[in-house]
Amino acid sequence: MTPTQTERLRRRNALWQQLRAGTPGTPAFEETLTALSLLTGWDRPRLLAGLGLTAAEVPPGQP
């Protein structure tokens, strides 16, 4: 594994950890979700499913 791949995996894992610890629907959660989406290429519903949530449970921008 190259250093770049290792850094990418560490970043991905850190973002997942932040999402699991965060509060769905908050601005910080949405920012982290967007960052992970850009890194992985996964869309929002797929990322939320990875957390056991649905888009209906966490509308974008929910306070």
Image (cartoon, rainbow, N blue to C red):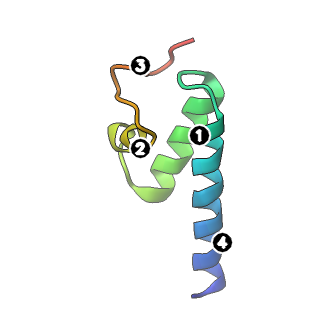
The residue under label 1 is 19
Q: Is residue 36 left or right of residue 42?
A: right
- Local crowd size for mark 3, using a 10 Å CA cut-off: few (<14), some (14–19), many (≥20): few
Q: Residue at x 36, y 40 (%)?
A: 49
The mark closer to the camera, 3 or 1, is 1
Instruction: State the residue in front, 51 or 4.
Output: 51
Q: Is residue 14 left or right of residue 38?
A: right
The mark closer to the camera, 1 or 4, is 1
Mark 2 and 1 residues: CB-CB less than 8 Å, in contact? yes
Q: Is residue 10 left or right of residue 53?
A: right
Task: Looking at the image, tell me whether mark 2 or mark 1 is earlier in sequence order.
Answer: 1
45 lies above or below 41? above
Mark 1 and 4 residues: CB-CB less than 8 Å, in contact? no
The residue under label 3 is 59
The residue under label 4 is 7
Quadrant of residue 24 within the rendered picture: top right
Q: Which disc is residue 2 wearing?
A: none
Q: Mark 2 belongs to which amino acid?
A: Leu
x then y, percent, for residue 63: 57, 11
x then y, percent, for residue 9: 58, 68
Q: Mark 1 belongs to which amino acid?
A: Leu
Mark 3 and 1 residues: CB-CB less than 8 Å, in contact? no
Q: CA distance from mark 4 to mark 2?
A: 20 Å
Q: CA distance from mark 3 to mark 1?
A: 15 Å
Q: Residue at x 66, y 83 (%)?
A: 3
Q: Mark 3 belongs to which amino acid?
A: Pro
x then y, percent, for residue 31: 59, 35
Task: Looking at the image, tell me whether mark 1 or mark 4 is earlier in sequence order.
Answer: 4
Task: Looking at the image, tell me whether mark 4 or mark 2 is earlier in sequence order.
Answer: 4
